[in-house]
Amino acid sequence: MKIKSKFANLQNHQIFVKVKRLIDEYFQNNGFLAVDTPLLSPKLIPESYLDVFETENLYSENKEKLYLTPSPELFLKRLIAAGIGNCYSLGKSFRNKEPVERKHSYEFTMLEFYRVDADYFKIAEDVMGLLSFMANKFFGKNEINYQDKIISFDNYEKITVAEAFNKYAGITDIFDHQNFFFEAKEKGYRVDGLDYTDVWSQIYGIEVEPNLGKNGQVTFIYEYPPELAAITKINENNRAERFEFYIDGIELGNCGNEGVAIDEYQERFKKDIETRQKLGLIKYEPDWEFIEILKQLPKCAGIAIGVDRLAMIFANFKSINDLKLISIE
């Protein structure tokens, strides 16, 4: 690997800095408390779909293992359970085995915020408020121009995951697994030996995702299958109460209502630990206390937003690397 400095990107980088400053300004104007969360933790939430960076504290007698945090979630939820109220974190997150390309990096800036006594549609309003605030500060109007397309923030599109699969992929019912596998196979997708989420992800990535946020508005896609619930509430209709939002086919944030069924999550927690072991991912001490924290959460909803991607769009670039002054390649 080489360390490269890119002085030609100075103006671009200043846009990235301004985006972070405007995020701080918006949330502090709206009564959210800024929280500076640790970047190293001795315990983590087990997540089977990502790996982490490991180090150790040489000062401790037993050379305590520490891990760069993939998100500030385990800290923010502790604070919310303790009664801190509406809060946000704006800082670095780290995910190992990530490709370094136009939308990804193993080191990136994440905005994560939570609103108490609110659901995820209120978070969608917060997101639109933030985007409008930034657009007006940058350009003096409630829209941006990204890759020769005008994206208006006056309104936004909402579409359920089921509607999107039907509209863009011709899959009539994603919740009927037998029908889902049959239609996927008819379309030519490999289904043998794969589970539901594997096939779902194939179709979503190829046929659904590229169409989101393409109509001159932000798209919020919501009501996911329970198999893709993450740590979010599953409602009485067996739908995960979470959304992702997109601009021009680029996913920018992932939101969900808190209120996960603890018994179900305990089993998923254990399963993720087993999956990590099978995949040979870095072994760390799971944050078992996190389950108790979830029991204490008040009604709330929160979202994680990739700030590098957000800045890339406001700067009208195709790659997050265009914003960096220094990169490791």
Image (cartoon, grey):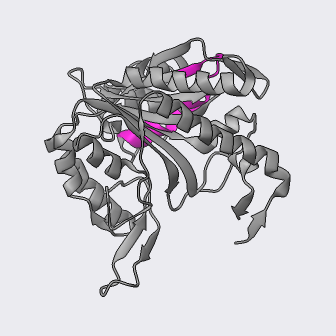
Answer left or right for 74 relative to 245: left
Instruction: Note whether residue 58 is visible.
Output: yes
Residue 210 belongs to magenta span: yes
Task: Decide whether the magenta segment is chiefly helix, strand or loop.
Answer: helix
Residue 317 belongs to magenta span: no
Q: Is residue 269 above or below residue 205?
A: below
| Residue at the (67%, 45%) spot, across then down | 17
Q: Is residue 158 above or below residue 304?
A: above
Going by the picture, which residue comes out furthest to the right? 8
Q: Quadrant of the C terminus?
A: bottom right
Going by the picture, which residue comes out furthest to the top? 155
Instruction: Note whether residue 211 is visible.
Output: no
Q: Quadrant of the N terminus?
A: bottom right
In this view of the protein, which residue sits in the foreground, 166 or 75? 75
Q: Is residue 313 above or below residue 214?
A: below
In this view of the protein, which residue sits in the foreground, 250 or 114? 114
Q: How many marks?
A: 0
Answer left or right for 147 relative to 221: right
Report x, y in % for residue 101.
67, 52
| Residue at the (38%, 38%) spot, across then down | 87
**What are the residue bounds of the magenta stretch?**
196-219
| Residue at the (44%, 17%) spot, across then down | 163
Report x, y in % for residue 61.
30, 87
Going by the picture, which residue comes out furthest to the bottom? 61
Going by the picture, which residue comes out furthest to the left? 263
| Residue at the (36%, 39%) spot, across then down | 196
Report x, y in % for residue 53.
47, 67
The quadrant in which residue 135 appears is top right
Report x, y in % for residue 285.
28, 67
